[in-house]
Amino acid sequence: MSKIKSVKAREILASGGAPSVEVTVTLESGSEGEASVSYGASSGSREAAVILDKNPKRYNGRGMMMVTDFVNKLIGPSMVGKEAGEQRLRDEEMIKMDGTEGKTKLGGNAILGVSMAIARAQAAEEKLPLYKYLQKCFGLEDNTRLPKPMIVMIEGGKHADKTTDLQEFCVAAMGDKSAAENVRMLMEIYEALKKILKSEGLSTNVGNEGAFAPNGLTSNEKPMEYLVEAIRLAGYVPGVDVGISLDAAASEFYDLGSKTYDLRIEHKKLSSNELIEYYMNWIEKYPFVSWEDMLSEFDWENWPVLLKRMGGRFPLIADDLTVTNTKIWQEAIDKKAANAILVKLNQAGSVSETIDCCLLAIKNKMWTVPSHRGGGETNDTFMVDLAVAVGSEYIKAGPTRGERVCKYNRLMRIEEGMSIE
């Protein structure tokens, strides 16, 4: 192992044009690790805090100079001289230094940036790919798996204006093709979808996540019809080669006061039971791989109802409900509210806490699906190595824009490395 020599943070730009934070950790040996932190446009209420400057004269209040100062003047000096290879200890020290439940003092964005950069620095020190180092560090050597891509094809909700109420309509690879073949297949479907949308007179502009954001749709079901058509047009078989994954992000259209769901484009306000019935009308019509956040994070009592109605046909993934938090994830498992979890490093706020959440899923034989963020993604690919290290079934990201495609390029690079070992 080697001790930490320096920790340096800086303000960079994320995908939405607002800042994020990037951290470089240098070890006494000269090895370096660098990491940048993503954040979401649509986010769960109990995620680790993303601290902003709130200075209206810089980036409309979204600057991150305060966070860089926290790293450069507080967290970084506390890490200097300590072993980079003791990842869990370093993470626990930073969490204790913050001392709050949601990392509201120093920020999950500050702590995570340092945490990820330390892991990368030690991986470089040991001359290991990041995923192999994470496996060694957390005892995950038996979990290696190349995740399949789950690519967002049509986006709505908070990620695109005047589109659907549901947030993401994804196509997910099935079967046992290579990562490179899966990526190629899904991108061919994406191109077929573009032709279909154009033929319908719909916009093929893209939203926050690089997926199509057609306006003028009159139902939340229409995107699934287009996806099935695109799969066939590209020469693949729905339900065999690929399937559909939905992320409703239902918290975004849930009214807590009336406990109803407002489907704006269909002019419907539905109770939880009515929304569940609304979804059930789709279940035999489309080749689903997974559903995610189909109910609000504030509608806990109805998640078990939905999961039971689904009858084990495919997983129900929790995202806003569980926010990559081991304690909340355990509650969801105990209540049979969900049987898979979306994993976002910045929701947890440290590498160790993220992996602990994944370990709980592994223990219960449930899927983990590491994911990009909508409005503030960066070019960092840590989530891909994490997915390989913990044996995730899928990774989720958009199909275009550099901060999205770098995830799939990293996946294919890992596959290439495995083939020559």
Image (cartoon, rainbow, N blue to C red):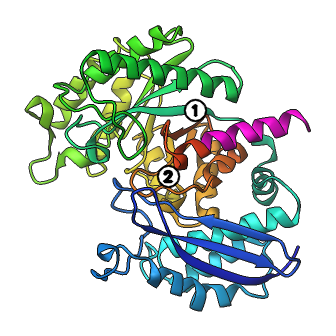
Residue at x-position 64% and y-position 70%: 115
The disc placed on residue 330 is 2
> Which dot marks residue 149?
1
Q: Is residue 44 above or below residue 91?
A: above
Above or below, comparing residue 51 to residue 393 in the picture: below
Q: Disc 1 residue type?
A: Pro
> Does residue 208 sit above or below 355 in this rendering?
above
Left or right placement of residue 145 versus residue 208 in this view: right
Quadrant of the snapshot with the N terminus: bottom right
Disc 1 element: strand
Instruction: Provide the major secondary structure of the magenta segment.
Output: helix
Regarding mark 2 in the picture, which secondary structure is present there? Answer: helix
Residue 167 x, y percent position in the rendering: 32, 39
User: Where is 57 relative to 243, above or below?
Assistant: below
**Spatial CA span between label 2 and label 1:** 26 Å
Labels 2, 1: front one: 1
> How far across and how far down the image is residue 135, in percent?
78, 52
| Magenta span of residues | 407-421
